[in-house]
Image (cartoon, rainbow, N blue to C red):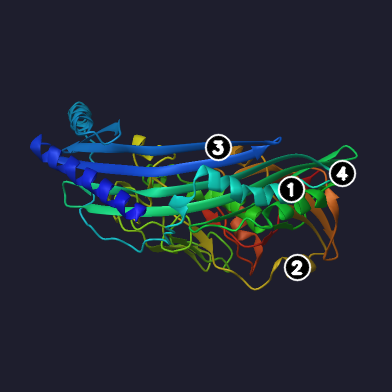
Amino acid sequence: MVLEKVRSEILEVADLSMKYARDLNIPSAESFVIKKSLTNVEYSKGKTESRDGMVQGVGIRVADGKKVGFATCSGFAPESLKQSLENAYKIARNRPEDPRFESFVSDSIHGKEGVLDPDIPQLTSESQVEKLRVLVQECEIEDQRIVGMNLSAETEWGGYAVATTEGCMVSSMKTIHVGTAYIVAMAEGDRSTAFDFVVGRSVQDFAGVGTRAIESAFKHLGSKPLGDTLKVPTVWHPLSASYLLSTALSVGLNGGTVVEKQNPLGSKLDQQIATTALQLNDDGQIPTKASTDAVDAEGTTMHKTEIIKDGVLKSFLFDNFYGPAYGGKSTGNAHRNEPTEYESIPTIGPNKLIIVPGQKDLEQQLADCDKAIYIEGMPMGMGHSNMITGDFSVTATNAYLVEKGEIVHPVKPVSIAGNFFKSLMDIEQIGSDVIDLPFPLESTTLTIHNHTITG
């Protein structure tokens, strides 16, 4: 099996790097070894383009007491490994001590591996083009309202291994398949965009993705100006709600910024920060999720962490550096920046934050609203929000006016202003609907009060 051959190769390289570390009398070292294949096929303006690539390299961290150095090498050549170890050791010896550094991971405990589909490594660019034809056939219809499209099929497969002189030797593998349709529609001067996708760890069926994207784009044509400033409930589609809360909680739950005293939630542990209906867990052990791994990027086993219970903040997320610095331990949330992970040192991030579903679906939540704004898609400007105060102002380009429980018509882009952290307390309804999403946080439909809408 191709995946097992890759696993054997990266574990061998990780083990070899530790052997070299001992030969060089390096006191403490960590090796992060990655090998993954990436394929992307895109269709736009009648043309199909494909890209194939391989990410392969090693990130080396060396500790000399409490001094830590970092170096990398692309590829697995023995001389490059030795040189990277020597470079990292040289850097460590010339750096100041960090009294908070304890050690690299010493355990070799694997969590559950996510679903691995042996058919994904067999998906060549040519076979991806065939998969893409399903989307092309759905989207290239005789309708003059469609003025642009971008269709794509992507695969990722491979894995990483982590070894330390302290005795850690672990690995994790992954297979991912994604299909996406992005549509631009226009009618009578009114422009609308929409997208839809499928993502999973096994080979995906793209049927319906293009059709749903087109329907969503058409649905927003004929939008009308809101012409007012309102303070009414906002109802967020799961995709939109996930984007909203991911932005805030990816920062607010970072235990590193708590230690550095730069986190607005740093003093809120064991206090109520959200509606009592909110239950939120970080789970890196759901086999079907793209974010699931056996271990994190430092070699700590992934597991489930209770984050918010009955609205009360129960835990932050930590890596192996900041966990002990906080007085605890790693929660298995060390990540490295894609796409060339071996070139970055670990940072803290969610594995998969998941809101526990409530009782009412979208239709039922809308039915409860006398007047509201329903939001789909991904509002623009979220990244420019103030992550310290939590204040935000974003533009929703796919929004709808709701009156007496019914969607009346789409509205022109509206500004939505509020505060991320206050919004957690202002959640009135948590939906029963759950869909797979590619965000750090996976939400249901949410109804939130006290946002100001202007359009």
Q: Nearer the viewer, mark 2 or mark 4?
A: 2
Question: What secondary structure is found at the residue carrying circle 2?
Answer: helix
Residue 273 in sight from this viewpoint: yes
> In this view of the protein, which residue sits in the foreground, 76 or 242?
76
Residue that mark 4 sits on:
225
Percent position of residue 426, x then y? 65, 59
Instruction: Identify the mark nearer the N-term, 1 or 3.
Output: 3
To which quarter of the image does residue 331 belong? bottom left
Percent position of residue 132, x then y? 62, 48
Question: What is the C-alpha distance between the residues marked 2 and 3?
Answer: 40 Å
Q: Amino acid at mark 2?
A: Glu
Question: What is the C-alpha distance between the residues marked 2 and 1?
Answer: 28 Å
| Picture disc at residue 50 | 3
Q: Residue at x 69, y 47 (%)?
A: 136
Q: Nearer the viewer, mark 2 or mark 3?
A: 3
Q: Amino acid at mark 3?
A: Ser
Question: What is the C-alpha distance between the residues marked 4 and 3?
Answer: 41 Å
| Picture disc at residue 139 | 1
